[in-house]
Amino acid sequence: MPTAVLMGMGLTPQLAQAKPLPKNPFQDGPCVTAPDDTSKEADKAAADKAEKEKAEQAEAEKKAAAEKADKSGKDDSGKATAEPTPSPSAGDKAGSDSDGADGTDKAEPAPSTSEEKTEEPAPEPSETKNPLDPLGVGDALKDLFTPDEEKSESPEPTPSASEETTSPESPEDKAKDTVDDVTKPVDDTLDGVKDGVKDGADKAGDTVDKAKEDAEKAAEEAAAKAKAEESADPMAPDEDGKKPFPCVVEKKVAGDAEQTPSPIPNQPWYLEASSLTLKGADYQGVVNLTMPNGKTKQSLKYVIDSTDIGDLHQIVDGPAGKKYHVEAAKGSTSTIRNGKTTMYTESISGKLFGLIPITFDPEHPPPLNIPLIYFTDVKVKQAGQFGGELHVPGLHQSITD
């Protein structure tokens, strides 16, 4: 049975004086995982992996941009050469009487002087005119090389004064103009394609340069972050000189056999309290306890100078599923004084220094041995407790199913 149950009868309740709460010697906030060599290597490996991924991504973007620029140039060039402007052909003879297929106007024959004087109908075109020479280039060349034949034919009419000032272009000039009209759109299109390819290449180059700069910047940031994390000590003290409390880690140990002053009960007892203060605490490790039924179990061993318990409530599991309760007056502080107390604790959980939620047990032992331990909203599973005198203000007992 717990000490409170054994000593509860006949004790005179005394209300404890309100005392200031212990100050937190650690940084406020959650616990901090202490770094080790393995975690540093893992962080470095993660940074290297991130840097490698950034470099691969930059290379892929560079390749995609180059392929896009090359494809863009080919598409534009193919489009420009796929649809050239059509040149005049023999099949366009009928159309050339009005407007040519290339958009040029039909060359009008020069008006003769006889037409103006006698108003005779214009001579019919020769039936032997070359259908492949709608512009009359062949006739002009013939006249040039056979001047005698030209003299034998009817003389050309003398053009009027108005016609002299606006003489029509020669067939050679018209042929040159037609060639210029055909080739100029092609030249303009080729120039546009060249400009487009150059612009595409310039843009692709800009994209590649930007991707390269982004990759280099990301790699530098990752390296700087990894270096900062490696050099930073999460357990470093703050400006007030306080260090963070290290988080509890799983640590199973074999434990040492412990001989208690008297046999511990087979059943543990439980403590629920609004606060628990252990002063002069000395954590002495994990021990193995043997119960009257011959079984063993592990517990944490503490040796305490003095103990304060706010709103004490002890619970013991009894026969037939009954629960035995020992409670102090609400708002009171029970104390254990006059000698050291040895506590065999199976688990203790609560808010360390009122801030850090934490649980200690044989598989998750305390990371530090601190002389002052303060919990709020605490729950304790106690295997046994020996030494000291317990005072419970306003003690009352009850039994529940």
Image (spheres, helix red, strand yellow):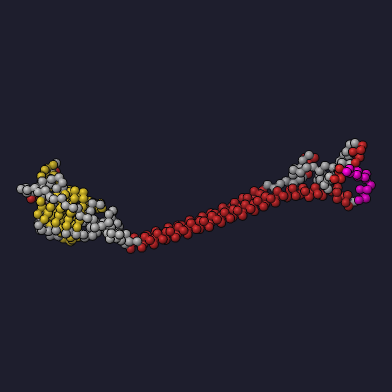
Frontmost residue, 164 versus 223: 164
Frontmost residue, 39 versus 259: 39
The image quadrant that residue 330 belongs to is: top left
Frontmost residue, 17 versus 351: 17
Residue 323 rendering spot, x and y as whole percentages: 13, 44
The mark tally for this picture is: 0
Side of 128 relative to 392 (left or right): right
Query: In the image as oriented, which residue stretches furthest toward the right?
Result: 152
The answer to whether residue 147 is visible is yes
Q: Is residue 320 above or below residue 336?
A: above
Q: Give the position of the C terminus as an image quadrant.
A: top left
The answer to whether residue 93 is visible is no
Residue 385 rendering spot, x and y as whole percentages: 13, 55
Residue 202 rendering spot, x and y as whole percentages: 58, 55
Side of 226 relative to 341 (left or right): right
Side of 193 relative to 2 (left or right): right
Query: In the image as oriented, which residue stretches furthest toward the left?
Result: 10
Residue depicted at x 19% and y 53%? 21
The image quadrant that residue 198 belongs to is: bottom right
Is 58 covered by the magenta stretch?
no
Q: Is residue 79 above or below residue 301?
A: above
Side of 327 relative to 85 (left or right): left
Residue 37 rendering spot, x and y as whole percentages: 33, 63
Residue depicted at x 55% and y 56%? 206
Q: Is residue 9 above or below residue 288?
A: above
The image quadrant that residue 104 belongs to is: top right
Q: Which residues are magenta?
A: 147-161
Residue depicted at x 10% and y 52%? 390
Residue depicted at x 81% and y 43%? 107
